[in-house]
Amino acid sequence: NTKDLSLTDPQSEFHKSLISITSCYKYQTKAVETVCIDTDVYGFKKREKPCEAGTITLNSQGAPVAVTKIESEMLPDKDKPDVIKPRFIITVRNIGNGEVVKQEKVEAACSSDPISYKEWNSVNIQVYISDISEENKLDCDIVKEGIHDSGTMILKKKEDSIRCTYEKGYSEDKGTFASPLYVILDYGYTDTISQ
C-alpha cells in the first residue's frame, strides 16, 4: 500500500520510488558425472585401460550453486593392500547473483529474524557412486576448528572444495572401469532485484 502522496509532498503530482523484491527459497542441485575408477594404481597389470582417472570440469547445472570441478584420486587402503579407495575432491561455487543460506534458515532470510554468520554460505553435500543408495554413499565428513561436521561446506569467497572417499573401496581385481558419480547439494538461496 502506498501512502497518500498529497500528505507526503503536497507540491508533487508524482514521486519516483525504489521497489525491491527479495526471494528466498530452498533448492537442490544434482550433478551426475561419469568418473574413472582405476584399481591398478601403479600400472602393474599389462592391460589396456578403458578410461583414465583425472580432473573433470563441469558446466552449470542450471542452478545458482553448481559443482564446477571433480578431481579423482585412487588411494591404496593401508589396512587392506589389495583394496583401492577412490577419493574425489569436489569444488562447489555460488555462480548466481544471490546469497546462500543454510536450508533450515531460508524463511528467516526473508524476514527480520536474526541469522548467525555461520548459517550463511552453508551447503550440505551428499555424494554417491554407482547409484543413490546408502551402501554407495561416500564419506564427506570434514573437521574444521575441531568441530566434526557431516558433509557441510562453507562457501568462502563463493567457493569451497571437499574431499569425499568411498571407504568400502574396490578390490584390485575389478580392474579399471567407468562409474556414475552423483553429487547432491541442498541449500537455501536468497536474491534481491530492485526497480
Image: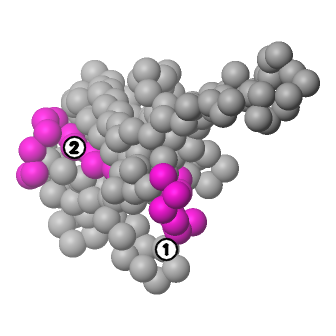
Q: Which residues are magenta?
A: 111-135
For the N terminus, the image quarter is: top right
Measured along the vertical axis of the image, is residue 145 above or below residue 102? Answer: below
Q: What residue is at 49 percent from the left and 21 percent from the top?
A: 59
Q: CA distance from mark 1 to mark 2?
A: 23 Å
Residue at 22%, 43% in the rendered image = 128
> Three-letter amino acid code at disc 1?
Lys
Seen at 62% across and 55% down, the residue is: 156
Picture quadrant of residue 133: top left
Q: Residues within 10 Å of mark 1 (few under 14, many from 20)?
A: few
- In front: 148, or 129? 148
For marks 1 and 2 on the same chain, the one whose residue lies earlier in the sequence = 2
Q: Residue 139 placed where, x, y %? A: 27, 59
Q: Looking at the rendered structure, which numbered label has been put on residue 144? A: 1
Q: Where is mark 2, residue-wise?
A: 128
Left or right of 167, for residue 67: right
